[in-house]
Amino acid sequence: MSRLDTLKDKHPGSTIWVLGSGPSLNFLSPHFFEDKTTVSTNYSAQVLGLTPDYAFTHYHEDALSMSARIAVVTLARDTVTQQEWRGEKTDELVLIEQDNYNPPGSAWNPLTTHPPKPDSLAYGSSSLHGSMHLAAWLGAKHIVLVGADCGTLDGEHRVAGYPDGDKLWVLYNEHHALMKAWLQREYDVTVYSLNPFLNLNLEGHTFQGV
């Protein structure tokens, strides 16, 4: 098992691509990411047919079935059961400690009430926040979110093959913006989002957001 501090600044000044689970992933090829440093949130890379460099999840069950070239990062206690890790402690596994393992509520705010621990990663309302923080922790100068859609595309709310989940688009949209602001303040990074289409007209596809 590895420690989080061994990942600190492994990719200084780089562009790191962070995958969410939104339906815009349906319009991307896994080959697009072959020469890029990637962080997968939960199963997103797996359903896309991609082995990411890193993966982050709040859930031990997910971490047990996820693979990454360098590291799979998860909480020391599962966010649902709050049990300690019970699987094999492989070389690529990184367990991070938190002061509180109760899932954050709608009032989560890394800028004020929920600042991440100095030696850990953000524990937000979505695993995406930990993935974003991991990218900055790795030394990214630029973070590109992929599939952090916060809405539906042609009526689909997840990339094909991804397990159904919460659809708290208004909350996630707000919290993603707070996480971006915190990363900009603490790490001086840029945070953008990939549009897989020619422009914001989406080539005739229909997006319904918050």
Image: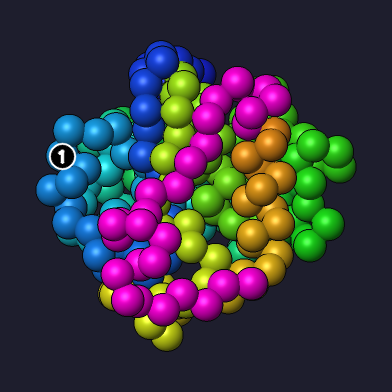
Residue type at mark 1: give it. Glu
Q: Secondary structure at mark 1?
A: loop
Q: Is residue 41 above or below residue 105?
A: above
Q: Is residue 69 above or below residue 40?
A: above
Residue 22 is left or right of residue 33, and the answer is: right
In the image, 155 versus 96, the foreground residue is 155
Q: Label 1: few (<14), some or many (≥20) within 10 Å?
A: few
Measured from the top left, where is residue 103 in percent x and y? Answer: 71, 58
User: What residue occupies the far bottom of the structure in this picture?
Assistant: 155
Q: Kindly tell me whether residue 64 is visible in this rendering.
A: no
Residue 38 is left or right of residue 100, and the answer is: left
**Start-end of magenta stretch:** 183-210
The quadrant in which residue 27 appears is bottom left
Quarter containing the C terminus: bottom right
Q: Kindly tell me whether residue 128 is visible in this rendering.
A: yes
Q: Is residue 131 above or below residue 80?
A: above
Task: Identify the residue shown where x is 32% and y is 39%.
Answer: 38
What residue sits right under mark 1 in the picture?
A: 34
In the image, 44 versus 31, the foreground residue is 31
The quadrant in which residue 56 appears is top left
Residue 37 is left or right of residue 117, and the answer is: left
Quarter containing the N terminus: top left
Residue 193 located within the stretch drawn in magenta? yes
